[in-house]
Amino acid sequence: MPDTNISVDELPPIPDKRYFTIGEVSELCDVKPHVLRYWEQEFPQLKPVKRRGNRRYYQRHDVLMVRQIRGLLYEQGFTIGGARQQLSGESARQDSSQSHQIIRQLRIELEELLKELKQAAH
C-alpha cells in the first residue's frame, strides 16, 4: 500500500527523459506496479506505449496523469468512478478553454484583416 502520508507535492521530481518503465513510475508516484496496471484498465487517459514483450513505457504526461489519479484517490478520497468522472470533466473543460482561445484569436485576426481591407478600399 502506498504511503498515503506522502502528498503529490512531496513526490520526487520527474527526470527529464522520454520514457519510463513501470518500475520507475511506481517509484516516482509511490504506487505499486499492479495498481498502475489496474488503473490503466480503469482510466482511459492512462495509455502507456507497449513495446516488445508487452513491456510498458510511460511518457511524462502518463507520469503526471498517474500523480493526478493518485491525488484524487488517496488525498481527496474519490472513488475510482468519481476520479474517472473528475478527469473526464477536466479534459472537457481544457478542450473548451482551448477552443475559446482559438476562436478569440481568429476573431482578432479577422477584425484586423477587415480593417486592412476597408483601408485599402478607400
Image (spheres, rainbow, N blue to C red):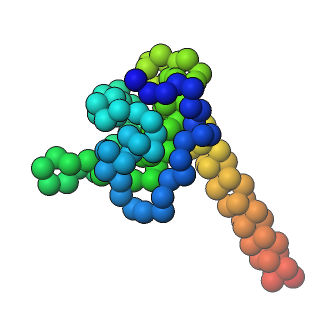
Residue drawn at point x = 43 percent, y = 20 percent? 80
Residue 44 pos. (x, y %): 37, 34
Residue 26 pos. (x, y %): 38, 40
Quadrant in which the N terminus appears: top left
The image quadrant that residue 42 belongs to is: top left
Residue drawn at point x = 48 percent, y = 62 percent? 16
Compared to 102, does 7 lie above or below?
A: above
Q: How many badges with numbers are in the image? A: 0
Quadrant in which the C terminus appears: bottom right
Front position in the image: 102 or 46: 46
Residue drawn at point x = 28 percent, y = 30 percent? 34
> Does residue 86 appear in this view?
no
Front position in the image: 63 or 88: 63
Residue drawn at point x = 39 percent, y = 62 percent? 18
Front position in the image: 110 or 28: 28
Residue 101 pos. (x, y %): 68, 53
Q: Is residue 41 left or right of residue 43?
A: left
Residue 97 pos. (x, y %): 65, 44
The image quadrant that residue 17 belongs to is: bottom left
Compared to 50, does 7 lie above or below?
A: above
Compared to 96, does 118 lie above or below?
A: below
> Does residue 112 appear in this view?
yes
Compared to 33, does 59 lie above or below?
A: below
Q: Is residue 58 left or right of residue 16?
A: left
